[in-house]
Amino acid sequence: MVSPVHLPNGKPKTVIVTGGAGGIGAQTIRAFYEKGCNVVIADLPFSKDAATQIISSFTDSGRALYCPSNIADWDNMRTLFREAKNKFGQVDIVVANAGMMESQNFFDFEEDEAGELLESRDSQRVLDVNLKGTLNSELNVTNIPLRLAMHSMKSNPLDSDGARGSIILTASTSGYFGGTGVLSYIATKHGVVGAARASQRKATELGVRVNVIAPFFTPTYITGGYSDEWKRRGLPANTVEDVANAVVSTSIDPVRKGHHVMVAGAFIKEIETPRTAMTKDWLGEDIAEIMIKGGQFFDDMGGYTMPKPRE
């Protein structure tokens, strides 16, 4: 039986992890490498030393590659995929992990000398990285990896489990709840969840599995401002190993298609299937029936008919 981390020809699968030089991303790189995969660390140029240190810790550095990458830059990300394929042949798994949180409250109203409200550039950076970057991998920065990954994988030969590739989009519990008030971050993580849901039709058509990992509180750089108090209160927390292991297992499990896996300390739970099953309880049978018929209409149409651009 072929290993889920190897191609039918016995060669190791190749994994790209954005934000792969630190925190959850770095541990994910280590976990995939230990499974036997080729790994590509995609991260900003300032992460070079950290990425080099990770690769130097591997016994076979030939199975690893560092590509300085900005996930909000389309040309930069195209270069990433090109270099990964040039070295390893094809890209089999993409983990759109890179993300950031704002450093300033969205409702801190900064004004210019005339008392006019200034644009929040901090918020725009979060949108560029977390959403645009994802769609291009994913649109929270998830945008860019998602689109490029699907394009790259569509020409892969079918794997032993019948798929051409696997994509993990990194959301958060903030992609389903919004109580912390960190507006830009929460909005982008909701966008990642929406991107994953909206991708399923095309993913099925192309033979690519797209799933979501939604970590609960995990001590990393962006949680540094309250990690100690969280721990003092005895609240449950993930480790980077918890999240990385969930990423790996979800990415190679052929049953995982359109799943959203929440990681909360000792608890790992798929939450998208139960949400779908609760639609009638949530909306009521009357509205749920309308939604089902509407969905069937678009299925029959082969998808949504796009409007023509306005002149």
Image (tube, helix red, strand yellow):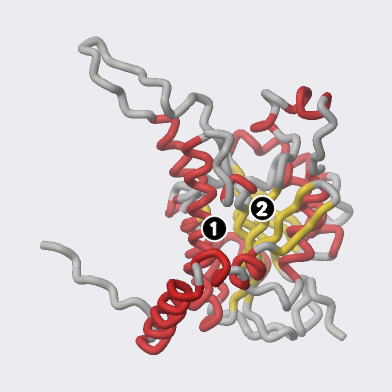
Residue drawn at point x = 68 percent, y = 86 percent: 162
Instruction: Give the quarter of the image for residue 219.
Output: top right
The x, y position of residue 297, in whole percent, is 37, 84
Which quadrant, please, contains the N terminus? bottom right
Residue type at numbered disc 1 = Val
Amino acid on which disc 2 is placed:
Ala
- Label 1 crowd bin: few (<14), some (14–19), many (20+), radius 10 Å: many
Residue closer to the observer: 88 or 92 = 92
Graded by Cα atoms within 10 Å as few (under 14), some (14 to 19) or many (20 or more), the crowding at tag 2 reads: many
Earlier-in-chain disc, 1 versus 2: 1
Residue 223 showing in the rendered view: yes
Up-down relation of residue 143 to residue 199 (above or below): above
Q: Residue at x 45, y 36 (%)?
A: 125
Q: Which residue is mark 2?
A: 214
Q: Can residue 148 be seen from the camera position used here?
A: no
Residue 129 higher or lower than 208, as above or below = above
Q: Residue furthest left?
A: 311
The location of residue 9, given as percent across then percent down, is 77, 84
Check disc 1 and report the residue beneath it.
Answer: 193
Is the C-beta separation of discs 1 and 2 under 8 Å? yes
Find the distance from the CA under tag 1 to the CA under tag 2.
9 Å
Q: Secondary structure at mark 2?
A: strand
Considering depth in this image, is 244 or 292 the residue closer to the camera? 292
* Image coords of residue 276 (percent x, y): 59, 70
